[in-house]
Image (cartoon, helix red, strand yellow):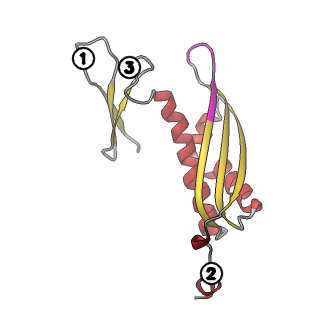
């Protein structure tokens, strides 16, 4: 079971700032555009989607496909309905994978598994939005990070 709570930080003021506490005892401020002291709740949905798929994809790339990933980023852009509830209507996810000799087929399969099997946030978002996913591979240029033949054999 997932639990969380939000508490109004200044109940006697007009501002609408909350402190959020997760079941794992992590804290963050939530706010709206006017207060600008923390993320809006809907932004956390986008972050949750990016984080959920990122954990899935990096795990599959490293454990199943043994890819030499040295960097990884997931970018999210979401369009919302104009009227309340302003649910996501279209979401674009872009994966940027940096590493040595990254196999595009491995990335495609890792993303597919995340979208179809593992990412619970993605399944929820797909109830109202179309997901469009892209990726790019960036070849690692840092020489000292390159795997050496001795390290691969040992």
Task: From the top left corner, tell me how far across and down residue 144 is, in percent.
Answer: 57, 73
Vertical position of residue 109 compared to residue 115: above or below? below
Quarter in which the C terminus is drawn: bottom right
Task: Select label 2 or label 3 by which is in front.
Answer: 2
Residue where numbered disc 2 is placed? 148
Number of disc labels: 3
Q: Secondary structure at mark 2?
A: loop
Q: Residues within 10 Å of mark 2 (few under 14, many from 20)?
A: few
Name the residue nearer the viewer: 37 or 134.
Answer: 37
Q: Earlier in the sequence, mark 1 or mark 3?
A: 1
Instruction: Specify the segment rendered in magenta.
Output: 77-85
Q: Secondary structure at mark 3?
A: loop
Query: Residue sitting at 59 percent across and 24 percent down?
Result: 87
Disc 2 + disc 1, Cβ < 8 Å: no
Task: From the top left corner, tell me how far across and down residue 18 is, in percent.
Answer: 33, 26
Mark 2 → mark 1, Cα distance in angstroms: 60 Å
Residue where numbered disc 1 is placed? 11
Vertical position of residue 125 compared to residue 31: above or below? below
Q: Secondary structure at mark 1?
A: loop
């Amino acid at each position: 079971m997932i639990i969380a709570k939000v508490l109004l930080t200044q109940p006697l003021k007009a501002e609408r700032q909350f402190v959020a506490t997760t079941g794992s005892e992590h804290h963050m401020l939530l706010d709206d555009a006017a207060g600008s002291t923390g993320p809006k709740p809907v932004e956390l949905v986008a972050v949750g989607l990016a984080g959920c798929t990122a954990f899935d994809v990096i795990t599959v790339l490293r454990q199943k496909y043994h890819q030499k990933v040295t960097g990884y980023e997931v970018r999210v852009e979401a369009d919302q309905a104009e009227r309340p509830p302003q649910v996501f209507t279209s979401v674009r996810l872009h994966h940027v994978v940096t590493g040595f000799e990254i196999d595009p087929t491995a990335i495609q399969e890792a993303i597919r598994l995340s979208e179809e099997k593992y990412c619970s946030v993605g399944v929820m978002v797909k109830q109202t939005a179309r997901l469009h996913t892209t990726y790019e591979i960036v070849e690692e240029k840092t020489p000292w990070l390159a795997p050496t033949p001795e390290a691969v054999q040992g």
